[in-house]
Image (cartoon, grey):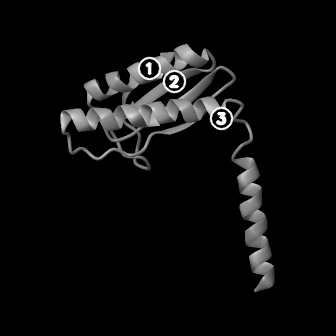
């Protein structure tokens, strides 16, 4: 029993260290993600939509970009609101750029791309 707990603790600790590997723009990724979430919340409150959206996911996708993924929508006005928020953040931080991919499918389902936008 103690060995299982130790192995579990080691795996948890190692995965915590690994999650930060390869993410040179971690702070910037969080800023992009936060801006997208705020844009979604603001849009939903103004449009009074009941569409349930998954929280956007982000990760570093190269030396020059952070990738942001939004699932389960085909709402063009929502995408425009998110792009506006991302442009504001990108103007402040300059680097990295951001690649937004919007899927009409839910996370974990076969991916159906609605929009792909790159902001440098």
At x 60%, y 19%, the residue is 93
Please tell me the numbered disc located at residue 117: 1
Alpha-carbon span between mark 2 and mark 3: 15 Å
Image quadrant holding the N terminus, namely bottom right
> In the rendering, at what x and y percent does residue 8 appear?
73, 71
Residue picked out by circle 2: 99
Tell me the distance, in whole angstroms, between the alpha carbons under discs 1 and 2: 6 Å
- Secondary element at tag 2: strand
| Residue that sits furthest to the bottom in the current view | 1
Numbered label tally: 3
Which sits in the foreground, 43 or 12?
A: 43
The reply to whether discs 1 and 2 touch (Cβ–Cβ < 8 Å) is yes
Q: What crowding class fits label 2: few (fewer than 14 Cα within 10 Å), some (14-19), or many (20 or more)? A: many
Mark 1 / mark 2, whichever is N-terminal:
2
Which-is-in-front pick, marks 2 and 3? 3
Residue 13 lies left or right of residue 57; in this view the side is right
Residue 87: x and y, percent? 46, 17
Q: Write down the residue under mark 3.
A: 26
Q: Locate residue 96 relative to residue 51 in the image: left or right.
A: right
Q: Residue at x 29, y 47 (%)?
A: 52
> How far apart in space, not on screen, are marks 3 and 1 (Cα)?
20 Å
Answer few, some or many: residues within 10 Å of disc 1's Cα (few below 14, many 20 plus, some between 14 and 19). Answer: few
Residue depth check, mark 3 versus mark 1: number of the one nearer the observer:
3
Q: Compared with residue 56, is residue 116 higher up or lower down, i.e. above or below?
A: above
- Dots 3 and 1: beta carbons under 8 Å? no
Considering the numbered disc 1 on the image, is that residue within a helix, a strand or a loop?
strand
Residue at x 18% of width, y 39% of height: 48
Horizontal side, residue 12 vs residue 66: left or right: right
Q: Name the image quarter holding residue 64.
A: top right
Please, which residue is most extreme toward the left here?
Answer: 48
Residue 83 image offset from top left, x and y in percent = 40, 21
């Amino acid at each position: 029993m103690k060995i299982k707990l130790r192995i579990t603790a080691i795996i948890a600790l190692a995965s915590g260290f690994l999650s930060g590997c390869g993410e040179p723009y971690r702070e910037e990724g969080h800023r992009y993600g936060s801006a997208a979430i705020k844009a979604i919340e603001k849009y939903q409150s103004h449009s009074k939509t009941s569409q349930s959206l998954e929280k956007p996911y982000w990760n570093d996708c190269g030396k020059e970009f952070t990738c942001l993924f939004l699932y389960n929508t085909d709402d063009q006005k929502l995408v425009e609101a998110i792009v506006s928020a991302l442009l504001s953040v990108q103007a402040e931080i300059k680097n990295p750029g951001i690649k937004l991919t919007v899927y009409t499918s839910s996370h974990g389902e076969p991916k159906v791309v609605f929009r792909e936008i790159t902001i440098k």
